[in-house]
Amino acid sequence: MRSKNLDNEKSMKLNSFSKFFIANWKMNLLKDDVVNYFKKFNSLCRKNIPSNFLIGVSPSSIFLSLTKKIASKNINIVAQHVCGEEFGPFTGNISYKQIIDFGIKYCLVGHSETRFFFNISDNEINKIITKLISSNITPILCVGEPKEIFLKNKSTNYVFNQVMKAFKNLKENDIKKVIIAYEPIWAIGKQSASFGTIQKMYKSVKRKILNKYKLKNSEIKILYGGSVNKNNIIEIFKTGVDGVLIGNASLNPETFYEIIMLGKQVVKH
């Protein structure tokens, strides 16, 4: 029997959320670490998280079931990657069908590390997004340019082309179901892009998408990722981005919570 909470999640539209905070744990933490993390994070998030904030935690796939069981209901569990095939000879992969069994409603797609280490093509990313949408799972499409593209001042077109390849053959109504996370590859785990660069990319890429698909501003959500921390979160949100994808800083539950609370200071609910 489906839980009432899952049915509510299913009916929620992305434009009902004012800000998004997604913790990408990558390949970190052990079982006891995960349990202790949520003991603390659940307690912190019990009362102070606005209902129009979407909070997500993306653990290693081996912990999807555990985190789904122990996380508070206002914390969404996000898969880091799935295969675009239902079943078959794909050793080491997990299917989009399999995460449905855990009640997972969000999934990262095309993170730069996934693209590099798993050699994921643009066609595969498009296929995964299509399968996720058809399964009522929200894709979080990760895009971002390498340093050489940034230095040539070609970032906007490069990232927009990534988005277009990922959106191939999608209808406008489906595009509204995708969250985009802009993560310049050169900023991941190093130093955040300048606030001017973040604002420029957010506005220029969003404008191109809105013009292409004739959508409303609130119907496209673009997050920023790349060395987000408690020291820069306020300025990042002042650029206008719809949320953040957080790496290393999210591995500590108190730091992740502090980032959310700092974001709350600059957001009108």
Image (cartoon, grey):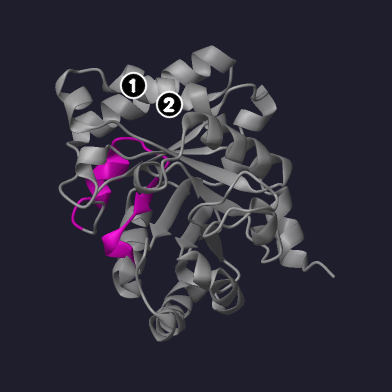
Tell me the CA gap for discs 1 and 2. Answer: 6 Å
> Between residues 127 and 226, which one lies in front from this camera angle?
127
Which residue is found at the position 39% from the left and 58% from the top? 24
| Amino acid at the residue labelled 1 | Tyr
**In this figure, which residue is indicated by the disc labeled 1?**
158
Q: Is residue 177 in sight in this rendering?
A: no
How far across and down, in percent of the image, does residue 112 sit? 35, 42
* 7 versus 197 height, above or below: below
Q: Which residues are magenta?
A: 231-250
Left or right: 71 with respect to 190? right
How far across and down, in percent of the image, does residue 181 sit? 41, 40
How far across and down, in percent of the image, does residue 10 sit? 72, 52
Which numbered tag is attached to residue 88? Answer: none
Which residue is found at the position 31% from the left and 72% from the top? 252
> Between residues 203 and 226, which one lies in front from this camera angle?
226
**In this figure, which residue is indicated by the disc labeled 2?**
162
| Amino acid at the residue labelled 2 | Gln
